[in-house]
Image (spheres, rainbow, N blue to C red):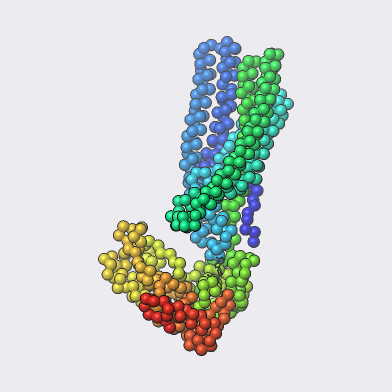
């Protein structure tokens, strides 16, 4: 499925209008109001001198002159005040819209298919989308502003065009052509910038690296011992020189374009004003009309120049909105409520991996290759292998976090892709090496529910089974103690081993039929890991359990051990059988055991 959205501007504008309707409908009222006022202020300003001159030259009495001038000045002041007031309201409401989009981005990040979170492209879009919603200069806010300015410019252009057309349509053509010429000069600068920005960013990045290295205490030792200061200095100097060269070229281009633009503007205004002067001297227009057209000529070019600028801005922003929508609409393939329902409290069923291959990215190498494995209901299985063998990937496939590139994972004979994925996740009590614990009460962590709905007896039983009850019951608040000293003044922190026990209690509370333990004990020493795994083995009786470890001694207790290497099952059997086979398992076990035997002061030694 296409991952990058390429909607045309109009479609994206409609999308933003729909989102505004949902997030802050008031902005849709403010938008036409401010456009009207933006256009009204210059129109009144242009007409004001003409009206006054007309009144004076028409011999109007002073009272009428004052009344007319007062009315126009009052209208102008009112419009300007309304403009400021609307600006303030819009400014604030754009923040609300940013928050609206931020909520959409967060929800997408929290609920997207897990495999998207591992997709580099998705993560780039996610980072960009979060960054784009920051402050009031988000893509949304900038598009809103550009659209308001575009429509204001369009109205002003039409209004001033209508005034000029009564004078001479050719004058409009002349003004339009010269303004467009100036605009294209500006475009050349933008194009040059677009082409050369990467070059500048490269110089800046390398200079920044040197500046950061100078401030990095970890790098300080190497810099001194390996005399890297001169080398780093050289890099800085060289890049600074190149950067200055870049700016020299840029300012030359900028100056050239500005000079040419000014020359065009000068010709435009000289010709236009000379023409107006000629008409006035010939008596074809009154002095009042001369003043009006004088203002309108300048205004017309300004409206048109700005209008063309907004089109370019909107085009640029459209690209950013497309990136943003690519993130929000990133394809999701897991079935949720439309999937087959699954009972999480049921007894475990047969779990089977059938000829499963998996690769990260479409053309990456096979991380799991044609792997078949069956877990009978309630069976305890150990999966061992060196780091990088594919153990965690295998767990992610079994848990349905990611999906097989080929083959299938079946549960109770059904491809797990057919199940409601959220229901499928509830089948698992998992403890991973990289866990996350929220700063809530101990009971809430264990039960993953709010205080009011927790089965406290069950939570206590799980904490007892996990071996953490003694510690928790000794705290003045017991299970109501809040976790996280950094978050709560009266919160507690737990040691690495205690955290593992807490996570185990959480996995137990779930009463799920399948438990996966993916090296949650890796931070412990091998002996403690072995002891903890044996405890888990006892507690998990009746549940299908997968123990993962890269330390072969930790899972010796399992009746069935699978050794994987390069994503394939190399050997399979009980510990003693595998040792007796004197194959790869034996070799790895001996190497690891030798290491432990040789390590002095490590306490107990394996095997
Ligand atoms: P183990 O758990 O046995 O240490 P993993 O399953 O984590 O092994 O990794 C198996 C292989 O897949 C390794 O070569 C690793 O570099 C690669 N790998 C793991 N995660 C990713 C990822 N998100 N993107 C690309 N490659 C990955």
Q: Nearer the viewer, residue 280 or 179?
A: 179
Q: Nearer the viewer, residue 427 or 355?
A: 355
Residue 179 lies in what quarter of the image? top right
**Residue 7 location (% of width, % of height):** 64, 51
Displayed quadrant of residue 120: bottom right
Residue at the image point whose x is 57% and y is 38% from the top: 148
- Residue 328 horizontal/vertical position (percent): 56, 55
Q: Position of residue 260 (x, y in %)?
A: 67, 31
Residue drawn at (68%, 28%) of the image: 264
Query: In which quadrant of the rendered image does the N terminus lie?
Result: bottom right
Regarding residue 533, the answer to whether it shows in the image is no
| Ligand 1 found in image quarter | bottom right
Name the residue at 32% across, 67% down: 479
User: In the rendering, at what x and y percent does residue 238 appear?
Assistant: 57, 46
Residue 68, visible in the rendered structure: yes
Q: How many marks?
A: 0
In this view, the residue farthest toward the right is 170
What quarter of the picture does the C terminus occupy?
bottom left
Name the residue at 64% across, 22% down: 293
Q: Is residue 476 above or below residue 171?
A: below
From the viewer's perspective, is 55 left or right of 283?
left
- Foreground residue among 58 and 510: 510
């Amino acid at each position: 499925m296409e991952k990058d959205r390429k909607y045309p501007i109009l479609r994206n504008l409609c999308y933003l209008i729909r989102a505004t309707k949902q997030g802050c409908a008031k902005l849709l009222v403010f938008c036409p109001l401010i456009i009207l006022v933006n256009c009204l202020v210059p129109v009144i300003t242009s007409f004001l001198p003409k009206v006054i001159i007309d009144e004076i030259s028409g011999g109007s009495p002073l009272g009428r002159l004052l009344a007319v001038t007062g009315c126009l000045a009052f209208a102008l002041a009112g419009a300007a005040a309304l403009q400021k007031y609307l600006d303030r309201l819009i400014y604030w409401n754009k923040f609300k819209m940013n928050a609206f989009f931020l909520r959409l981005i967060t929800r997408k990040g929290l609920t997207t298919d897990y495999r998207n979170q591992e997709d580099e492209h998705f993560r780039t879009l996610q980072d960009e989308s979060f960054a784009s919603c920051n402050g009031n200069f988000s893509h949304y806010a900038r598009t809103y502003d550009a659209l308001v300015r575009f429509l204001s410019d369009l109205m002003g252009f039409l209004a001033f065009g209508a005034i000029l057309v009564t004078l001479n349509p050719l004058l409009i053509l002349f003004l339009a052509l010269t303004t467009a010429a100036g605009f294209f000069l500006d475009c050349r600068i933008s194009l040059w910038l677009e082409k050369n920005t990467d070059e500048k960013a490269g110089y800046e990045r390398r200079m920044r690296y040197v500046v950061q290295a100078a401030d990095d205490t970890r790098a300080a030792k190497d810099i001194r011992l390996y005399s890297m200061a001169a080398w780093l200095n050289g890099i800085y100097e060289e890049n600074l020189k190149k950067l200055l060269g870049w700016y020299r070229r840029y300012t030359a281009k900028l100056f050239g374009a500005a000079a040419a633009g000014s020359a065009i503007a000068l010709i435009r205004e000289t010709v236009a004003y000379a023409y107006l002067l000629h008409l006035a001297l010939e008596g074809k227009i009154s002095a009042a009309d001369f003043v009006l057209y004088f203002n309108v000529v300048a205004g017309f070019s300004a409206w048109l120049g700005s209008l063309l600028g907004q089109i370019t801005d909107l085009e640029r922003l459209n690209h950013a909105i497309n990136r943003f929508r690519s993130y929000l609409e990133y394809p999701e393939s897991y079935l949720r409520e439309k999937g087959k329902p699954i009972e999480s409290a049921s007894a475990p069923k047969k779990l089977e991996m059938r000829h499963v291959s998996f690769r990260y990215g479409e053309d990456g190498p096979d991380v799991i290759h044609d792997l078949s494995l069956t877990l009978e209901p309630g069976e305890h299985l150990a999966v061992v292998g060196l780091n990088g063998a594919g153990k965690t990937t295998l767990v992610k496939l079994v848990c349905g976090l990611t999906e097989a590139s080929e083959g299938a994972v079946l549960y109770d004979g059904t491809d797990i892709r057919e199940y409601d994925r959220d229901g499928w996740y509830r089948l698992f009590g998992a403890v991973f090496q990289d866990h996350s614990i929220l700063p809530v009460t101990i009971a809430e962590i264990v039960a993953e529910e709010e205080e009011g709905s927790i089965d406290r007896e069950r939570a206590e039983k799980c904490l007892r089974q996990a071996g953490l009850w003694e510690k928790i019951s000794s705290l003045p608040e017991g299970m109501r103690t809040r976790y996280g000293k950094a978050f709560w003044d009266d919160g507690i922190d737990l040691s690495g081993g205690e955290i593992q026990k807490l996570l185990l209690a959480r996995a137990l509370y779930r009463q799920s039929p399948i438990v996966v333990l993916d090296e949650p004990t890796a931070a412990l020493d091998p002996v403690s890991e072995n002891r903890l795994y044996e405890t888990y083995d006892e507690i998990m009786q009746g549940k299908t359990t997968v123990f993962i470890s890269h330390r072969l001694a930790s899972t010796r207790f399992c009746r069935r051990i699978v050794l994987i290497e390069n994503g394939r099952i190399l050997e399979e059997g009980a510990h003693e059988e595998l040792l007796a086979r004197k194959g790869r398992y034996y070799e790895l076990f001996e190497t690891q055991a030798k290491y432990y035997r040789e390590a002095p002061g490590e306490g107990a030694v394996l095997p």
